Image (cartoon, rainbow, N blue to C red):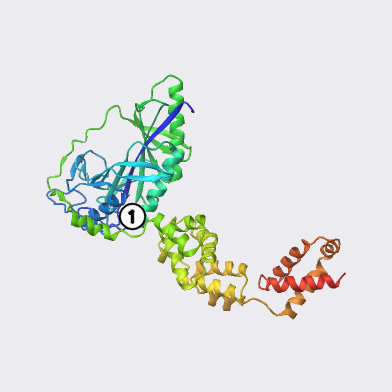
Amino acid sequence: MEDYEIVIGLEVHVELLTKTKMFCSCLTEFGAPPNTHVCPVCTGMPGVLPVINKRAVELALKTAIVFNSEISRFCRFARKNYFYPDLPKNYQISQYEEPLAKGGYLEIDGKRIRFKRIHLEEDAGKLLHSETGFISFVDFNRSGIPLLEMVTEPDIGSPEEAEKFLEKLKQILEYLEISDCNMEEGSLRCDANISVRKKGTKELGVKTEVKNMNSFKSVRKALAYESKRQIEILKRGEKIVQETRLWNEKEEITESMRTKEEAHDYRYFPEPDLVPLEINDGWIEEIRKEIKEMPDERKERFKKDYGISDYDANVLISHKGIADYFEECVKLYNNPKVIANWIMSEILAQIKGKVLKKEEIPLKPEYLVDILKLIEENKITVNTGKEILKEVYNTGLSPCEIVEKKNLLQIQDIELIGKFVEEVIRENEKAINDWKKGKQEVISFLVGQVMRKTKGRANPNIVRNILIEYLKSLK
C-alpha cells in the first residue's frame, strides 16, 4: 500500500431549493404521492417548450461565487442523449461545453481541492423495484428538479480526505441555503472516480467509477475498499478494468455494474428550445449581496463574541440550524458557555444527527432558557432539568407546565431533607463504618442514595452539608 498513491475525483449532484422544477412550474416537494408533481414538460411530451427557472440559476451563481469559480458571461444548455427508464424525454437537459462556471476550489486542512466545473441540469425520475425484482415502477415527481453538478479535479488523495471534503461542502451549501443536502431523500448525491498509481508516477491510472453511496461514511468505506482492491490487482501484475462499480453497503464491497471500455458518446448538442444565458456583472453583484456569514467566519465570531472554545464553536457551527438556535438562546439568556454545553450534550442527543432548521427543533429556544433559569434559581436540579428537557422535546409542553404537573420543584426544606438523610444512614451501616475508617468517598455514595429517595428533587448541596454534619456527630 505504501508504494502506491490514491487519486480521487468527485461528482456531486445537489438538488436546489427552488419551489418549482428547472424547466416547468411543477412543485419540487419531496414525499408527494408518485406522479402527482408532473406535467407535459417534465414528462417529455411532444411539442412542449421548457422555460429556465431563474431562481435555480441564481442559486448556482451564489455557489460559484463562494467557491471562487470563474462565472461564464455566456452559457448554454445542451441535450445529453441517452436512454434510461426514468428519463422520460430520452435525453437530459444539461450543460456541456459551456457550463455556468469553471474552476474554483474548496480548502481542506490547508489543501485546495479544485473544481473543474459547476453546471446546471435537470434530475431524472426514480425507479422503484418490487421485492422480487421482476417488477419496477417509475415515479416522475423528481424528474426535472434543478440539479447543480459540481465536478472536482482529481486532487483528493485519500478516502478520509474525500469524506472531509464532502462534509465541508455540505456545510457551506447549507449555510448558502441552496439545498437541504439530505442524502436520505436524494437531495445530495455523490459518485467517485478513483484510480491508483505508483508513487512518483505522473500518469493517472485506470479509473473506476463508484456509485450507490448514501452517506459520507459510505463514501469513505467504498473508496477505501476500492483502492485496496485496485492495489492488490496491480501487485498481482494484472490490469484494472475501466468500469462502473456499485457499493454494497451490507457486504461492504464494491461490485461491478458495467464496463466502460470507452467513454459514452452522449451526442451533446445545444438545446434548441432554450435561449442562451447571458450573465452580467450587475446580476452577479446582486447575488453576492445575498451571501451571508459562512461557517468559518461564524466560528471565529462565536469564539470572539461568546468566549467559547474552538471545539465548542466547531460543534455549534457544524449545522446552520444549531448555530442559529444557539444565538437565539443567547439573546434570551446571556450565558453562552452553559447554553453551548446543554446544546452539545442534550439537544444534539435528541436530534440524533438530523439536519434541522432552527424552527424545526422541537425544543423552542425559550423553553431551554426556562429550564436553565429554573436550575440557576435552585428550583430544580440539573438532573431534573435534563429529564424535563426530554419531556418538553417529546411532548411540546412548556417546562413550567411539566414542573407543575409532576411536582418537580427542588426540595430545599432542611428538616424534610434531614429525615431522608436519617433513613439513608440507618439503611447503610456498612457505608457508615467505612466512613469511620476514613473513606471520604462514602459521602458521595450517601448523597446519591438521598437523591434517589427524593427522585432527584433534593438540593444536593443541602444534602451534602446535612450528611457531613450528621456523620461528624457519629464520631
Residue at which label 1 appears: 179
Image coords of residue 258 (percent x, y): 33, 31
Work out whether 122 lies above or below 420: above
Disc 1 element: loop
Where residue 25 sits, quadrant-wise, is: bottom left
Mark 1 is on which residue type?
Ser
Residue drawn at (43%, 30%) of the image:
5
Q: Is residue 93 left or right of residue 11?
A: left
Where residue 20 sits, quadrant-wise, is: bottom left
Image coords of residue 163 (percent x, y): 43, 43
The residue most toward the right is: 475
| Residue 405 visible from this viewpoint | yes
The residue most toward the top is: 237
Number of marks in the rendered image: 1
Along the line of sight, which residue is nearer the eye, 87 or 12?
12
**Within-10-Å neighbours for mark 1: few <14, some 14–19, many 20+:** many
Along the line of sight, which residue is nearer the eye, 136 or 431?
431
Residue drawn at (81%, 63%) of the image:
431
Work out whether 332 lies above or below 184: below
| Residue 145 visible from this viewpoint | no
Residue drawn at (24%, 54%) of the image:
56
Q: Is residue 75 left or right of residue 247?
A: left
Q: Is residue 271 left or right of residue 328?
A: left
Image coords of residue 227 (percent x, y): 44, 32
Work out whether 60 lies above or below 245: below
Image coords of residue 435 (percent x, y): 83, 63
Along the line of sight, which residue is nearer the eye, 214 or 251?
214
Q: Quadrant of the C terminus?
A: bottom right
